[in-house]
Amino acid sequence: MEQWVWGLVPWGYRILLEAEGLRSRFLNVFFSMVTDIGSEMGYIVLLTLVYWCVNKRVGQGLSMAYLYTAALNAWIKDLWRIPRPGDPALDDLLNRAGIDRRVSPLRLEESPSFVSGHTQGAAVTWGYLAARFRKGWFWGVAGLLIVLIGLSRIYLGVHFPQDVIGGLLIGGVYLGAWLAAEPRLSAQLAKLESVWRYALAISVPLVLLAIHPARDSMTPVGAVIGLGVGYVLEGRTVRFREGGPWVRRVLRGALGLVIVLVTYVGLSALFGLWMPLLTSQSVQFALRALRYALVGFAGGWAAPWAFVRIGLADRAPKN
């Protein structure tokens, strides 16, 4: 299997060279905007707004589905370790295949190439939303976004076509399994005492992290812990309602994004001061996970708490 995946590199590279010939100023801007929908910042905005302003339960399920697939993607990338199209490590392989031109990527990416995290994440995220909202028109929008995000990675020269195809296949299989398992798991979690839900919110991601302790796993695992703890605490202490007039929803979204982005940027600056002083990679990894756990907690609990406190959301009664 590994030999077969590596053998696809020259085929995929030739397609990238053809795609490079189609570039224009307009398409550069268009596909850069499309790819940003599937970026880290794009998901911070999407996941939180669905949770705060559209459908609370769907937002919680969506966040967990996306973050766990992001952790899976990090593991798959490290398993194959295929270099990106712009990596000089491919030069010998490409020369042996008779390819003397080189792609000029329009984005700088450092993680391995196979499979495309943008495509896998898009398939899971937009597929999950389409499955939960069950609107015919939304299926069309979701499908279009998934395809465009995948194509954007090829156009920008940061992924091979086989990376995008692999992301679609793995994302689709993952999504099917998640949608099948989620109702049963949610029902079981609802029967547990809060202390056990806290324990699971922390222990399950940490077990996954122990299995694959890599830098790119720290972001989704940390966020899962912060969101998981935040969701349990929110259900016990805040219980905000996501409905209401659209004016309140818009104000909620604006305030929530300020809270989350200030946390995100502030912790980035603060931890950035410490990182050069740390020689232990394990400590650096732990701080990265902690940063994203705090960002997740800000979105899962702190923002809803603020909504209720200032009257932007109603509080549901205790069960």
Image: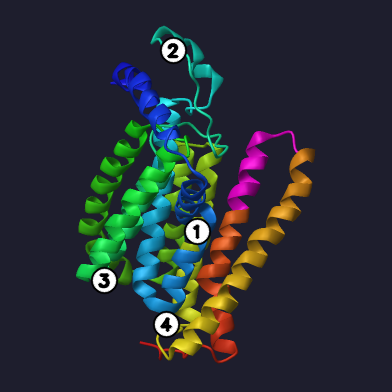
Q: CA distance from mark 1 to mark 4?
A: 21 Å
Q: Residue furthest toward the top?
A: 96
Please state, as top left, top right, bottom left or bottom right, where the C terminus lies in the image: bottom left
Report if residue 297 is visible in the image. yes
- Residue at 47% over, 34% down: 157
- Is 285 part of what is drawn in magenta? yes
Q: Which sits earlier in the primary sequence, circle 3 or circle 2?
A: 2
Q: Which mark is residue 242?
A: 4
Residue 212 point in image, percent of width and height = 46, 36
- Other residues around mark 1 within 10 Å, as few (<14) / some (14–19) / many (≥20): few
What is the CA distance from the residue labelled 3 to the residue labelled 4? 16 Å
Q: Say whether residue 40 is left or right of residue 119.
A: right
**On the image, numbered disc 2 is attached to which residue?**
93
The alpha-carbon separation of the residues under discs 1 and 3 comes to 20 Å
Q: Is residue 285 left or right of residue 127?
A: right
Q: Main secondary structure of the magenta part?
A: helix
Marks 1/2: CA–CA distance? 35 Å
**Residue that label 3 marks:** 133
Q: What amino acid is at disc 1? A: Gly
The amino acid beneath tag 2 is Leu
